[in-house]
Image: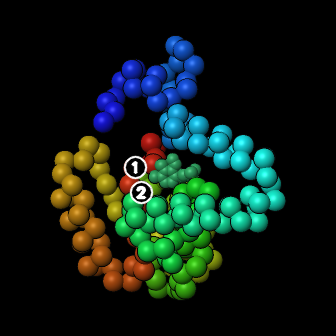
Amino acid sequence: MATFGRDTEKLLFRHEEGATFLNHGSWGSVPRPVYDERLRLLDEQESAPDRWFRWRVADLWTDNLEAACRFVGAQFQNTAFVRNATTAVNTVLKSLPLKSGDAILVYSWTHHAVRNICDATAQRTGADVLSVDIKIPIKSRHDIVAQYREMLDTHPNVKIAVLGKIMGSSHA
Ligand SMILES: Cc1ncc(COP(=O)(O)O)c(C=O)c1O
């Protein structure tokens, strides 16, 4: 099991000497085994492009999607790879049959790009955007659950709640 700290960073990442990389929110870097596998796959692609694009990519895509589904407990037929979180939220919101009177639930720290998608969806469909006001510092996770419960009890028109596992906004 890897521990946090400089030794692990050196072991697992390719960051230049003397630099401390903190900006995983904007563009992450990947651990060495992931990086090495990516290079191996690029080599494979270059060595036989026809085979790669005709057959190999589809198999890899399926295998990896199955693995991702096992990891997050999702069903294969309901899951797709997308390029980033913004695309994912946009895809889901665009696929919902929202209408006037419906509501999309966000929270006060929703990532700005994601919030913009919710606002644009509301404009397009006539739905409302409601927000759970989460105060920092958070005293207890039970408070957040209670806030959500109250919001959902009082607004049964909420059709979707958009949650970020990591709070994405630093200036709400
Ligand atoms: C909670 C949250 N949601 C959405 C995003 C947007 O991610 P992306 O830029 O990969 O689409 C981020 C990015 O940091 C985030 O932290």
Q: Is mark 2 within 8 Å of ligand 1?
A: yes
Label drawn at residue 167: 1
Q: What residue is shown at x 39% (from left), y 50% (from top)?
A: 166
Q: Is residue 166 above or below residue 92?
A: above
Amino acid at circle 2 = Gly
Contact between marks 2 and 1 (CB within 8 A): the answer is yes
Residue identified by numbered label 2:
164
Label 2 to label 1: alpha-carbon separation = 6 Å
Q: Position of residue 160 (x, y in %)?
A: 43, 75
Q: What residue is shown at x 40% (from left), y 20% (from top)?
A: 6
Q: Position of residue 80 (x, y in %)?
A: 56, 68
Q: What residue is shown at x 52% (from left), y 13% (from top)?
A: 18
Does residue 126 appear in this view? no
Amino acid at circle 1 = Met
Q: What residue is shown at x 33% (from left), y 79% (from top)?
A: 155
Say left or right for 147 vs 72. left
Q: Position of residue 125 (x, y in %)?
A: 59, 81
Q: Is mark 1 within 8 Å of ligand 1?
A: yes
Q: Position of residue 74 (x, y in %)?
A: 41, 70
Q: Quadrant of residue 2?
A: top left
Locate the N terminus and report the quarter of the image it occupies.
top left
